[in-house]
Image (cartoon, rainbow, N blue to C red):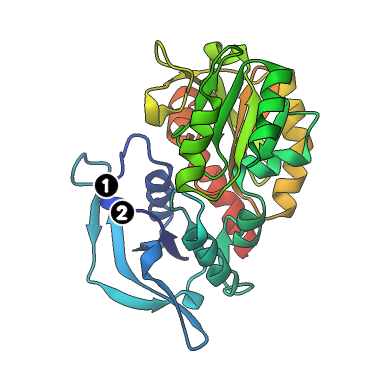
Amino acid sequence: MKIAFQMDPIGDVDINADSSFRLAEEAQARGHTLFFYGPDQLAYQEGRITARGHDFTVKRVQDDHVELGPLREVNLADFDVVWLRQDPPFDMHYITSTHLLDRLAPGTLVVNDPFWVRNYPEKLMVLDFPDLTPPTTVSRDLETIKAFKDKHGDVIVKPLYGNGGAGVFLLTKDDRNLSSLYELFTGFSREPLIVQKFLPAVSKGDKRVILVDGECVGAINRVPAAGETRSNMHVGGRPEKVGLTDRDLEICARIGPLLKEKGQVFVGIDVIGDYLTEINVTSPTGIQELERFDGVNIAGKIWDAIEAKRT
């Protein structure tokens, strides 16, 4: 198959952690051809969805992991699969790219399905499952947020469309900084905030559970660094091997059919203790760590699912 990756610069990725690199590596091993372009190079041109980028090959060699061909323009309708893999922020630029990629269906398979990436971003899809999630409010109204904090005590405040643990704050019951933090966030963004009741179980880790086409394939635990509340690996969280609990499997059984129905082939959910906190569909990570811990070819499972959809 002809595979295109819409992603951040492939030359900058960590070959031992980046999920997009691992997906490209597995695709190449299966004989598929690869093309890379950045989201800024995506365009609509008189009825065609085009991109300017490079054919590429990968190899697992530090600092010499990608070889790019000459810059060229392609019609993405000529590709079998396009991967939507750039990182958030989930802003209007990101949203516009999902509208453009929508136009490739049904001839080209876009993974994950951009219509539902747009309509079910990570911190909003969980709202469909209030019984699985900690108490949550999404609001830009300070009085609403204050009332939520008064009710629940310690809370986590974060930007609704952020990623990688950036801008995540723990405010304890007696913390007096909520108004200042609110002013900071609303001063540079028109987006609402998401506020959740703090889960002390995060000290034992924030579990990343991977689902492929709606089916759970394993999990890793991400343990916060000393003095940190955030467990994201981008901010120093430590990955460790972990098994799946009955509660993890219950959560996956509840959300899996919806993910499959909406074309979300590669999804990473976040579970703290007994609670689902995020459903990551834009550019989930974690497959390399899971492969090392469990000895399972997760990238292979993802490509098996995609290849089945293209036959």
Say which mark, if any, is on residue 12. 1
- Quadrant hosting residue 37: bottom left
Residue 102, position as x, y percentages in the image: 60, 69
Task: Quarter of the image for the C terminus: give it.
Answer: bottom right
Residue 255, position as x, y percentages in the image: 74, 39
Q: Which residue is mark 2?
A: 9
Q: Image point 41% across, 28% down: which residue?
A: 233
Q: Image point 66% across, 40% down: which residue?
A: 141
Mark 2–mark 1 contact, CB under 8 Å?
A: yes
Q: Image point 22% across, 57% down: which residue?
A: 67
Q: Nearer the viewer, residue 156 or 133?
A: 156
Q: What's the amino acid at mark 2?
A: Pro
- Quadrant hosting residue 108: bottom right
Residue 119, position as x, y percentages in the image: 66, 55
Helix, strand or loop at label 1? It is helix
**Residue 219 shows up from this direction:** no
